[in-house]
Amino acid sequence: MTDTPAIELREVCRDFRRPRTSLREAPPVVRALRDVSLTVGRGERFGVVGESGSGKSTLLRLVCGLDRPTSGEVLVEGRSIGDQPARRLGWLRTRLQLVFQDPMSSLDPRMRVRDIIAEPLVAQGIHGDHQARVRELLDRVGLDPGAAGRYPHQFSGGQRQRISVARALAPDPDILVMDEPVSALDVSVRAQVLNLVDEIVDGLDLTLVFVSHDLSVVRHVCDRVAVMQDGQVVETGETERLFTEPGHDYTRSLVAAIPDLHAALAGRSAQDLARGAGRPS
Amino acid sequence: MSDTAGRTVLAVEGLDVGAGHTPLLHDVSFSIARGERVGLIGESGSGKSLTALAVMGLLGEGLHARGDVRLSGRTPATRNLLEVGEAEMARLRGDAVSMVFQEPMTALNPTMRVGAQVAEVMRIHGTRDRAGARARAVELLDQVGLPDVAHLARSYPHELSGGQRQRVVLAIALANDPALLICDEPTTALDVTVQATVLDLVVRGVQERDAAMLFITHDLAVVATVCERVLVMYGGRVVEAGPVEQVFADPRHRYTQGLIGASDLTGEQGRRQRAALPTIPGTVPAAGRFPSGCVFRSRCAHETAECATQPGWTPRGAGRVEGPGRAPGGDTQDEGAAGYACFHPAGDAA
């Protein structure tokens, strides 16, 4: 059982139909994912990078069972989720949890922090002392236990993201999926949250799927990275290899376009960045 | 000093902004010379955007500004911009000084074709006649690297991608050859390859016009790529300033040091070992809740009793390192151009 990958995608396609433009022709189809095959091993920190419209979010929705593939198979811990109705996916919610980009829109403003964090336990029908669990989780993510009685708007952006992480950890999942968790944060707070991610992924032995458009963040966090473009995975590889010797032209242009403090101080100008990016128009 | 005076485009002296009794900016002073690109960095809530809005005369209702802001564009700086009327400011905006905002979709008019929006700014300021403005608009759109401009000029903002929209905004900002271009996080909403292209266009547009630029961002790597000089803001004050190479390679203020540590994910030679990132403890306090004395002392590891009084400005030698590809600086900088306000500075001075 131990060699079953945490997440496996087999030739997954997802097409979206656009509204019909003519009565005689079939409606146009957007191919959001095209034959994507991926394997994320247990305990791995897997990154997904790509620009807007590359299919990152569609991929994420499929992995979380929020959407179904048009064709192909999605397996989580060896169990297929692509062909199951939502009511049969209860087990998935205790195994896999999500942290979203914007904590303000993913936390209910009318709920107290203790109810937000305990909600996955209530929804999954997990019994036990919820309040004790909430205190433990708040401590784990570095928040004061007194925070339990307050509302989300009373916290700063970084603290809200900690609340999101605590909620995701509540049902004791094996897999944590994070969708741009630090994009909305300031650099100093971003560093705090990245340290927290490091600590919980190591401490709880989680499998991490980390989606971001910020390549330097992915480089810091992940062991292995998949690069997406136009609904396809164009390259997958060990993070360091991918950044130092990108194999695909698209990866190369992405890596070359990252502004870097040290490279800039050594004289890399905006023109050099643009040249590396290949000036798409 | 004398030859900077002739080349200074923007001179801000002792700018204070407040809302009611809550002070928001304190004693912000800096100047930007012709052809110089200056970055303004700090976390959200440090007062970066407020500084830009005060210079543009775009402060919201209930905010009041005091101090001295002088702009020498086509005419020499004789008046304090904080004292001139709205009609006069409207004549300056889009002409001598223009601005690129973060979100291009809200900066553009959704009901007007983009070509007409570029032409409008020239018509309003009377720089060109109707046919001339229309022809020049197409030319400008071409200069910012947009494809098939004759056709694109007739499209509406919603038909363009985010990067294309931001290029249209840049074309509008550059239309009247401003003496000062202010960019407020112009690439934060863009993908990394598009960001690279837009940054290149901004720098080229400014260089071709020998204009001054104030570039606001929280991304240190972007500032290092684009700017020659940098101002670090925290709690409504400029806490450190100097040439990019000096400030980033050898920061003095503890806040600058913390920012660099927290944002540097890669380390000197590519990847750092997976170690905890250095962080600045806590978060930026709400406006008006900053401590007295040194604004950073509530988050600083080096705080002592001395920090309860406002630290003075320590000028730093203009011993600027000339990086390749950077404009020669010379020692025309005045004392305020490089320095820091900290009792317990990092680096050699410690």
Image: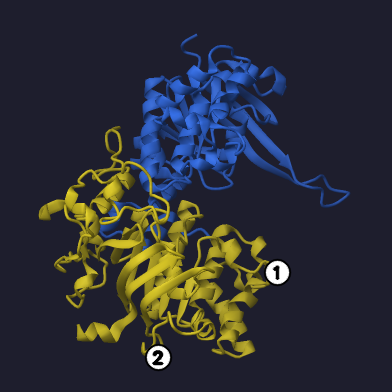
Specify the label residue B75 is tagged with: 2
Q: Residue B47's image quarter?
A: bottom left
Numbered disc total: 2
Relative to B162, B77 lies left or right: left
Ranked by sequence position, the earlier of labels 1 and 2 is 2
Q: Residue B155's image quarter?
A: bottom right
Under mark 1, the amino acid is: Thr
* Placement of A163 over or under A186, stated as above or below: above
Mark 1 and mark 2, same subunit?
Answer: yes
Q: Residues within 10 Å of mark 2 (few under 14, many from 20)?
A: few
Under mark 2, the amino acid is: Thr
**Tag 2 subunit:** B
Q: Residue at x 52, y 85 (%)?
A: B91
Kindly report which numbered mark, 1 or 2, lies closer to the viewer in this rendering: 2
Colour yellow, chain? B
Q: Secondary structure at mark 2?
A: loop
* Residue occupied by mark 1: B111
Residue A213: % across, % down: 48, 45
Q: Is residue B186 visible?
A: yes
Q: Nearer the viewer, residue A129 or B7?
A: A129
Judged from this view, the residue extending furthest toward the right is A23
**Tag 1 subunit:** B
Colour blue, chain? A
Relative to B315, B172 lies left or right: right
